[in-house]
Amino acid sequence: MDAFNMSKFFPTEAAFRSIMMAYNLMALFKHMVLQTKQHQELKTLRFQCIALAAWITKSAVKPIYNLALAKNKRAWMDGLFLSISKIPPEFRLSNA
């Protein structure tokens, strides 16, 4: 965070708010999708869930999003997608 210091206040505030929003989105992802309370580093989540090779192919009906995953990681990733599909469009976090 200390590497984004701008010469003016408003660009620095915009950068800080962007970092804060990204952090909160990752925390929400951990809470809602991974449903884990253990501490995981952001770079671990990035490599496990976000930084994946992918390509789009077309079928007769719709485009298909293909992920390049090792066979032993496919069931885990399918579980993530299933967790995401169960989240209602509007949700509220409980005070746990």
Image (cartoon, rainbow, N blue to C red):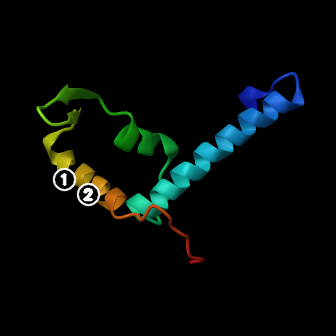
- Tag shown at residue 86: none
Q: Mark 1 and 2 residues: CB-CB less than 8 Å, in contact? A: yes
User: For residue 70, which quarter of the picture?
Assistant: top left
Residue flagged by tag 2: what amino acid is it? Gly
| Residue located at (35% from left, 43% from top) | 48
- Horizontal side of residue 84 vs 79, given as left or right: right
| Residue located at (80% from left, 36% from top) | 13
User: For residue 15, which quarter of the picture?
Assistant: top right
In the structure shown, which secondary structural element does the residue marked by tag 1 occupy?
A: helix
Which quadrant would the C terminus be assigned to in this image?
A: bottom right
Mark 1 highlights which residue?
A: 75
Callout 1 crowding tier (Cα within 10 Å): few <14, some 14–19, many ≥20 = few
Residue 27: percent from left, percent from top: 54, 55
Q: Nearer the viewer, residue 38 or 86?
A: 86
- Horizontal side of residue 43 vs 17, given as left or right: left
Mark 2 highlights which residue?
A: 79
Q: In this view, does 60 lie above or below 29?
A: above
- Horizontal side of residue 64 vs 32, given as left or right: left
* Residue reaching furthest to the front: 61
